[in-house]
Image (spheres, rainbow, N blue to C red):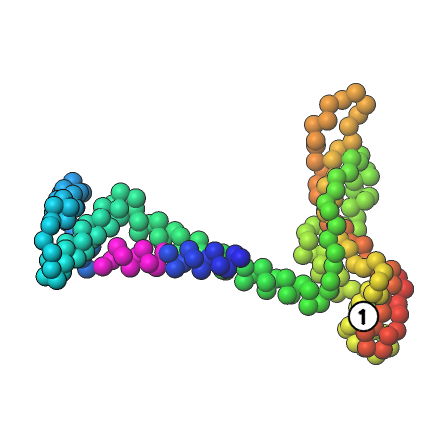
Amino acid sequence: MRNVIAAILILVSISVLMLVRMPGVTQLRSYPISTLEQEANSMQMKLDASTTVGSRAEIEKNQVRREKMYYRIEILRRSFGLEWLAACMGLFGIGLIALNFINKVESSRVTRRVRVHELMPTEVYVDEADYHRRTQDSFPSRDAAISWYETDPLRICSYCGSNTVKPVKGQKGDELQLITFYKRVPQGAKDLRIVYGSSWFVYPAAELQCEKCNQKVLR
């Protein structure tokens, strides 16, 4: 869906830029906008008043309509900054595509080596000593926590040497969670939500199995 929106934005941006850069539009850049508006209104009045029929008359009307369109485009360009608006739409569309590509690359990098279930973030109230004790085995970022799973020595089978050791299917798999620690509130005091910090915690599966030789490993 994101790519579809990005494609639409880019196509609209290109179309608008092509319109405002047509020779019939660019030659009007030197005229004041008041002159352009008067000429456009004059052309519309001429079209409304025309009663002539025939192929030649229709050709002349089409010529007037085309000229009026050039004037209207130039008026809109100046009034709403169509070039800047189109450029911003195009850049935003390109940014969406780039972001989607980066997300896919990052996602494939992670899922290619490990499959980790991310638990809902939670909050805990602790005292300072408990905070330091509980965060000794934590990680400062999500990437660092996933890297721990990727470099876990138990991922390499001690029998066949394969790197396809994974949690046993049907059992609890590898998990990680973000925990934010708040300073414990003394009895009767107002909770000021004083933050000690946030850390990522890993909860590895208790039982692993090699997909190649079926050897099982218990933590």
Q: Report which quarter residue 143 is drawn in.
A: bottom right
Location of residue 208 (image quadrant): bottom right
Q: Residue at x 14, y 58 (%)?
A: 58
Tell me: residue 190, above or below residue 202. Answer: above
Boundaries of the magenta span: 13-22
Please state the horizontal and vertical placement of residue 210, each as a whole percent of the image. 83, 72
Instruction: Tell me the quadrant of the picture where the C terminus can be found.
Output: bottom right
**Residue 29 horizontal side relative to residue 156, left or right:** left
Tell me where residue 79 appears, x and y as whole percent. Answer: 26, 42
Q: Is residue 42 left or right of residue 91?
A: left
Q: Main secondary structure of the magenta part?
A: helix
Residue at 78%, 64% (x, y): give it. 152
Residue occupying the point 86% across, 74% down: 214
Question: Position of 69 compared to 53: left or right?
Answer: right
User: Where is 139 relative to 124, above or below?
Assistant: below
What residue is rendered at 30% in x and 51% in y?
83
Asked if residue 152 can be seen in this view, the reply is: yes
**Residue type at tag 1:** Val
The percent position of residue 191, horizontal first and vertical second, equals 73, 26
- Judge whether residue 31 can be spotted in this image: no
Asked if the stretch drawn in magenta spans residue 61, the answer is no
Of the pair 24 and 168, the residue shown nearer to us: 24
Q: Which residue is mark 1?
A: 165
